[in-house]
Every structure is written in C-alpha cells, then in structure tokens.
Amino acid sequence: QALSRRLVEYFVMVSCNPIDDKLPSKEHRITKTRPPDPARDKMNSRTKARFDVRRVHLSNAPIDVSNGSPDRLSLNTSMHSSQSSMDPAFMASLDEDAEFDGDAIENKILVPQITARYPPKDHPDQPLNLRLPQFCHPEGMDLIHPTTQYKMPRVHHFVLTDSLGGKQYGTALTVYEEFTLGNKKKKPEEVGGKKGKKKERIHYAPRVLVLLSTWPYLTAFRTYLTQLYRLATTTNVMTAPIERYVQNICAEVPAPPPGAFEVQLNILGSNIRFWAPPANQPIPYVSLPVKVLFECLDIGNILFAWYTLACEQKVLLVSGQLSLLTVCAEILNSFLFPMKWSHLYIPVLPRSLSAMLDAPMPYLCGISRENFPFAVEDISDETVVVDLDRNVITLGPNTPDLPPLPHNRRKKLESALKANAGEVFWEARNLTKTDVLRVRASGDEGTLGEMLDKAGAVWEEKIRARDDAFNLAHAPDSASIQFDEDANVYLDDGSLPKQSRWDAVQEAFLRFYVSLLQDYRKFLPKGVDLEDRDTWRGKGGMSDLRFDQDAFVINSPLEFQPFLEELIMTQQWDDFITRKMHNAADAPDIKFFDQSIDAKRNRSKLKLKKKDTPFLHSASAHRDLKRVKAVEPNEEGLPPLDEGTGGAYMYKMWPTTFDDSLFGSPRPIPSIISAEFDRRKSLRSMLRSKYGSVELTRGSGDRNRNPEVTAFILFFATFTSVIGKELSLVEQKHGIGSRDDVAFGGQLLPPAMAATTRQTLANRDDDTEVARTIAKAQIDLGYDILVLMRTRRLPPEPITYKLLIQACGRCKVTHRASGLMDMLARDGLATNSEIYTSLITAFSNDDSQPSSLALYQMYGDDNMSSLSSQLSGSNLLVEKHPSSSGASEHSLDFISESSPSEQGSANKSKGLRLKNSMTSKLSANRPGFGKKTSKRKIPKFSKKNKSQTLKMTPIVSKHFELGESLLESLYPSIEIDDENVCPKCATSLDENDIFAGWTPCASNNYSTKCSSCQHKFVPKFSVTCASPTFEGSQGKGTPLYCDHLSPWVLLREIRSVINATGGVDSIIDEKFRSGPDISATLWWNMIVTFRRFKLPFIFLLQGSFQNQLILPPPALNEPTST
C-alpha cells in the first residue's frame, strides 16, 4: 500500500434516520435482540456442539482456574458486554402479552446513513467505502431505535479493506444526541408518578463521528475525536466552527514522512504527536499501545496466538470492548514482520457478516461479546478463538495441529518477552508473579482462589470502561507518554537508551525470523534476469529459475524444519519471497530484514564475545526527528458571530450535516514535509523505471503465459460485466433498493391508490423474478466456464473467481460465491485481499444472510458428489490440473489428490466435508521434503489441428452452438480467413502458427514471429459475409481486414475500453462493431479468440436482439440425447 501524504482521508458523520411507518414484526424484533440459547432454542446437533465448544466465551460464563504455571492461570471472572442493556420501553414491547404501540418513538426503527462527509468527493486513490455504516454499528443496523436512556460516548476502531488490498483504519466516536420525529407531535407522558404533572420524555439516538486514514494512529485519532467533541459541545473557547476543524485535520495536517519528521497537533491543550519509523520498519509498534495486548493475555497465550497466525490458521478475537479488537489485531500483525498477513482481515466483524467465519480460508477477525452468541453457529470447527478479556483460548474440534516451535528459538523468544513485559499481565490485576508462585507453592488452594478472584475483579473493573470515550486511561496527557514510558530514562552511564521495552518486544519476534531465515538468500536463483517475472515459483514453472524451497528446508537445522515446512506453504511467504525476487528495489522492509541478517552475522566477527546489536531503536530514532507543528484551523473569512456568543462557537449538540459556507480554501501542507514526500516519490519513479512494477499487473491475470487461459480471463472480464444488468435496470425502473422499499411491513396507502399499487407491485415482482432468473442463468454459465477450465486442465486464475464472485454479489447469489471460494481452495490457489473484499461485498449485498447451517447443507448434500456437479446437466468429473499445463502465477505447488472414486466416497463423509480449510488441505496433501519432485515444464504452444476437439460441457456447448447460429443469421455466409504469409520468406502460416509466434504476456507487442525465418510482423485476418449492408474496409459489401491481436494485447485493450466508457455496454452495442475502425477490430478479435477456444460469445451479440439471449433452457435440465 503506497504511503499517503494525507493524514486523514475522510471525516464522516453517520446519523440514524427513522423509516416512516415501517415497523418490524414482534418475532423479528425478538430474534434480533435475544441471542441464541441452546437451553431454550431448537438447534441441530452440529450447532449445539459448536455452542458447547465455545461456551467459555459467552457472557457470564464461569472460567475454570488452570493448574498450569502462573503464566497460564486464567482468572475466574464474568466479563460483561460493552453494550448497555436495551431500553426498558423497547424491551417491554417484546413482551408477548404487551400491547404494541406503533406510534411510540422508542418503537421506531432507525437506519444509519452517511449524512455528512469531508471531502465531499472521493479521493481517486482512496474511495470512500460505502459499507462504512455497517462497521459504525457492528451490532447490527436493522434494529436501532430511539432510547430514553442516555449513554456515554464510546470509541471503537475498525479496518476497511479496498479492492486492491489497501487498508483504511477507522476510528469511530459514538455519541447519543437528542432525537425527535421532526414536526410530528410527541405524546406527553407522566414522569415521576405524580398525577397531573406531565412531561415529554427525552429520547436519544446514536450519531457516529468517523476518521478514516491509511495510517494506524488509532490512539492519536481517538484522542483527537474526543477532544474535538468536548471542545464543541462543552466549552466556550472554540474560535472556529466545526467545519474548519474538519477541514484542518483532513486537508491541512500532513502525514509524517517515515523516519523524517514528527507532526504535532494541538487541540484543547492536548499535544497529539504523529510519527513513523523508517519506511522499512512496521508502524504499528510505535503508534499503538503494545502494552495493552500483554495486559489482556499472558505471554504463553500471546505466543500461541502469534504462532497460529504465522502458520495461517483461522483466528477469531473476542472482547466485550470493541476498541480492543483492532488494536490487538494490529499488534499481533506487527509481530509477523517481515511477513504480512495476506488473508481475510476484519478486526471488527459486523453481525451481518458472521457467516464468513465458516469460510474455507484463513482469517483474522474480531467480534464483540454481544455479537458472539449470534455468530457461534457460524464459527468454523477449525477456528482458534482468543478471548482478550478472559485470557482464554479455545480450539475447534478440527483445528489443525501446528508444527513444534524450534526449542532454542522459543526459549530465547520467551525469555526476551518475560524480561521486558513479564510482569505486565499481573500488574494489570494488582498482582505480581512472585506472589502467585509463593501462594501456589504453599498448597493453599483457598487463598490462591481468593487471590485470583480479587485480581479478576480488578481487571474486570479496569477493562469494562475501555470503550468509554472519556476513560481516564485515555486522558490526553497519558496518550502522549504511553509509548515512551522508559525511553527517556537515563541509563547508569548517563546516556539515554536506544531501545524502549516495546522496541525490544518487537525485536524479539524479528530475531526469531532472522535466525530461521538467515540462509534463505542462498537458495535464490543466481545470475538470472527476473525483471519480466512476477512469481518466485519460476518463469512458466521452470524449476531451475525458481526459489529452491526444498533445498532451503533440507539444509536448515533439523529443529527448524517442521516450522519452515509449514511457512513456505503460506501466502505470506509467497508474498515475501516474490517481493524479494522481483521487486526488492521497491521493498525497503525486505532490505531492512536482509540488513538485520547481516548485522546478526557480523556482530561476532573478530570478537570473542558477542556484541549486543539492536535492530530496532525507535527510542533514539524518535529523539532525532525534526518536529513540525501543524497549522491550527483557519479563522479567516468567517461570517461575524451574533452578539452574546463571546466570539466563540458553541453547539448544544453535534450537528447532523456540515454548513458548506463555513469551509474555506485548504492551506498547503508545510513545504519541508511536501519536499520530503516528493523526494520519495521521485526516487520511487526512478526505481520503477529501472526494475519495473509488479503491483501494476500482478493479480490482473495478464501475466499468464498460456494463451488459452488468457482467453478465459478475457471472457470473464467482459461477460461478468453483463451479469445482472437486467436486474439492475428493473431495480432502477421500480425504485427497488430505495429507502421507501426497505420495510418490515407494508406501507400504509390511501384506499384510492391501493388497487393501482397492488398492480404495480405485481408487475414489479414479475419483472424482478424474470430478471433474477436471467441473472442466475448468467452466473450458472460463468460457473460452468470455471468448471470447463478445470476440465481442460488449465491452471486457474484468481481474477476469474474474483470477477464471478463480484457478479454473485450484485445479483445476491451468495451460495455461488461460497461455492467459488471452496473451488478456489480446492485449486490450491494463493488467494488475495481483492478476492476476500469481493466475497465480503457479496455477503453484504445479501438481504438474507445464510447461516453456517445453510452453507453446510449446501456443501454437504449427499446428492452432490462434488461442487462441479451442481450445474444441472453437467455431470463432469473434475480433476486437478497437472503441472504440465503451466503454473498460474498465483497457484501454490501442485498437490496430489485422491482418485475419482476416492473423491466420490470421501464427499459422502460429513466429517471430511467440514474440513474445507485451504490450510488444512495443503498440510494434508503436501509432498514430503527431501523427495525428488518432478520438474514443471513451460507449456509448448504447438501447432494443433483446428479440427482437434476441445473438451466441452453441455451448457457451454449449447451456448456456443447458439452463438454460431446467431452469428450466421446476422452475417449470412460469414467467413473468417486467418491464414497469413510471411512477408520475408513467403511461408504460409495458419492460426496455430500465429499463436505460437506471439510473445507470451507481451501486452505491448503486436507482432508474431514466423516459424521458418523468425521474422516478426503484424498478422491480419479478414471477415466477409453475403450481407450487402456489411461495411468492410473499403465500404459496404467489401471484406473487413483486421489486425490479429494476441490474447494479452486484446485483454489490455478491452480493459481500456471498459474503463474509458464506464462498462461493457459500448462493446455490446451494435454500433461498436459497425464500420472499419479500431472498435470493429477489437470486437472481431474477441469473436476469433472465443471461437478458437470454443468459449461462448453469445453475449457479444446481445446488442442486435431485444430478447435476452442467455436463459436457462429446459433442455439443459433433461438428459441429452446423443
């Protein structure tokens, strides 16, 4: 993720607005407010078993005292949720015998919406995520209501991931402001029980103030938001309006260039500091309170949680305090340095997305204790649940076993942690480890239990207020010193330390990786130009040009091998070694890691005793930084204030919208900081011009050397843009998805409009049903194309899955999205954050979230022998693509798989069906180290006969044949001549020769190479037909001559057209292919490419027909005759 010079990307206000005359049913309200309970609710055995395994994390669950060492003791506490109890007036409405008052304010349903934002338009490089309200209200957005109980402001943090894998960190301050129904008259209610005295009851509704940034300065942003709210609503010293403060933090306060400056911001007497270590070091460990994690968990549990993430298992954090989840998740992530977590990452998981906890991929998620009971049935049986409040970790029944940690390295790591943070856990509970050991040694279990109970009460009291915005632990004065508690304490020799205690903690984990990976560079390919490659697995799969992972493991010390064997199969290792081999010049963190290895090796040279050489020294680095004070909000150009205000802006409550007239012109950031950013940008440009940029193309599929795979990618890039268009048009026509359409009951209409409305609704439902049927048929076709790739033994590409998952999200076909993720795991692909983001979008757009039981029934149906057979009429045996097909740039090492007969029987076992984690599959099928593995070969694009039959599925075959018929009807007697003659040696070259002569992945190279003389030239093809209206190169009725483009060039050009025109509509339009210009050349190249590889092109003809061409033919559901 590129560093942004903006400290804050957006300031957003999310307010709750009522839904007029729309009320939920009582059953719906009860379901949403009361968590599932195995003791009173009907559940299947699988769900009950999951509740039994995770019962220790439920609210008010007792905690058993361990018999282990003091580090492993759990405190007997019953933590409470961070959320206050429901409003009594609203809870009374849930009484089955109570009369429901639909006009009562507390029964109105509120919907959170973005009511104000700055800047008003998206940044092109960091667009505002529209799912923001979900994360502002993770407890659920469908049952927010006014309350008569005022609640104190609370703070929580969350992380949003964009489509490119970049992170936006959100800091949210939730305040409760007075709520009224506009001009609607409120009922007076008796207050205090005194007859004759009536008073209007005050109601409150939540409003959320959000700062979004690409920088993880969560604690600093918390301080800023709380101080700004306090300044605006409780003081009379605010000399500029809220709008100027918002503009100041978003547009005038710069982000600190790493390792160069500290930016200081003053608000209400608080000096907030922003700084970052050099760009080659992780930021979180200097921007977040690492101490918090060591207060929540003992060292043993911290090591287990970190090691679980290092092995890419599923991890779920649980806490009653939302603000803890993101902070602790980021700290655990920083311990992985130089690796980076590359899988699903949602530190605060909204209740609506809990079904993702049963997804077949590694994840690091967090969930509030309030939401936890609602998510238990969705938590995978492989998930490791880490309870931050109770210092408890539970494993699922199918959690994979982890390889043992190297004994000596574990001892050193544990020793370093105990030396620097060993007492933090006990000090947070007013205990010392010595006291616990002394009582434990005495054998007095009663005294020990009493001691732990008191300690638990102390910890509960301390942590339960963690989310409170004005908690004394987060007072402005404490926020500025919590990271430097010992960094400025003079040593015995009168000098200041280079390291703080948290530098040493972070370095302990770094030294672990330095020791284990110190020889990895010996196994990189030597003397090879890697400029045009973007995968460490070798060019086209050639084993002699790849990182030698087998030799690396075998030549490592014996105790390292189990962990290294696991590590090299992870996505984080794949990313690390890829950046090292192909983008090292633009990866300063890799360079820093290599320097750390060199420092470790050199520190004892020519010395009889090892010299202590710290790698991380933020304490001394921070003291050397230049300090720059940020400008304060601009007070110039403001309208005069009314008399009596004392020249100050005072707000009774925080406004719901901004006054645009109060914004000014942003002042430029300090030139000294701007020059530093520009210097880095200039250096980055020079490096990229010399070494290339992997990030621009990796993941888009244009680096696959196989032309047939590229043709499939081209198909998905265009076809998936068509999916759901009819549904979108119907929704626009009838206003589906608007606020008036969101209801739990029907809207009350005048009688005169009732009949017309019923007819309109009937027409809308009919149109919607037809559009959804079409969308499902289109998705089924796309799904069958993926099956076709597997049938033809082609290496799969994540971009094809991503595009189809996005289409599933638009059409709310989430069961296909889940099936696609399962196929992705089965293919052994290294998934990326873009795919996870697309999956989140698919589930976010679904009004009816599937539970894990639904997903289980979907995957576990005994009538389905495999996912590929879900398509009606497609009884195909899907086999693993062989290594000879050419490796995808994203695929992991090809792994052995069971035989077809074994697959069929295995899928009938429910136990095996539940083990759908990609990690566990890789672990189970990984080939043994030390064994000689077969070398992969570059696929030879040999001359195939045109008559050679490509494998087809029934659905694809029928659509292909229909496309041929329609093409013939539009262009009678059509003939496409693709034979060429070499202009140098006059050799005749057919289509196979043309394809064989193209340079794979060369999207800027338009020439092919003659197979005889190697001469390069631009090939052509001609299109002729009998229609007198067909416009060729020389007018109507003449042949059309087109440059023949390679699949890689065509993919790039078509994407350019889609980006330039805003969609695929222009390509489908009949005018696009009319005439002799470049548009027609592109369209006919798509036809030629799709016909060569027998891919459906019927959707490209849609512009010439009014009726939808892709429908689910009844014949596909019946046995086909031969």
Image (cartoon, grey):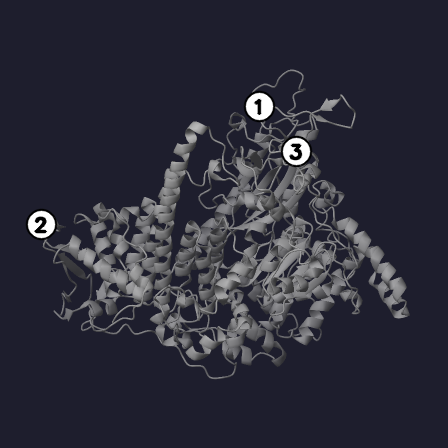
| Element marked by disc 2 | loop
Describe residue 849's horizontal placement relative to residue 149 as left or right: left
The C terminus - image quarter: bottom left
Residue 1106 at x, y percent in the picture:
25, 46
The single residue placed furthest to the top in the displayed view is 643
Foreground label between 1 and 2: 1
Q: Is residue 445 above or below residue 552?
A: above
Which residue, given by chain and number where applicable, does mark 3 sit on?
A: 204
- Of mark 3 and mark 2, the one earlier in the sequence is 3
Which residue, given by chain and number where applicable, does mark 1 sit on?
A: 183
The single residue placed furthest to the bottom in the displayed view is 931
Residue 495 at x, y percent in the picture:
75, 55
Is residue 887 at least partly visible in the picture? yes
| Element marked by disc 3 | strand
Foreground label between 3 and 2: 3
Describe residue 638's horizontal placement relative to residue 547 as left or right: right
Is residue 350 at least partly visible in the picture? no
Residue 825 at x, y percent in the picture:
47, 66
Residue 178 at x, y percent in the picture:
65, 30
Foreground label between 3 and 1: 1
Quarter of the rendering containing residue 293: bottom right
> Dot 1: within a 10 Å radius of its alpha carbon, few (fewer than 14), some, or many (20 or more) residues?
few
- Camera-side residue: 612 or 424? 424
Which residue, given by chain and number where applicable, does mark 2 sit on?
A: 1028
Give the Cα separation between the discs numbered 3 and 2.
73 Å
Quarter of the rendering containing residue 253: top right
**Residue type pointed to by label 3:** Tyr
**Residue type pointed to by label 1:** Asn
| Element marked by disc 1 | loop
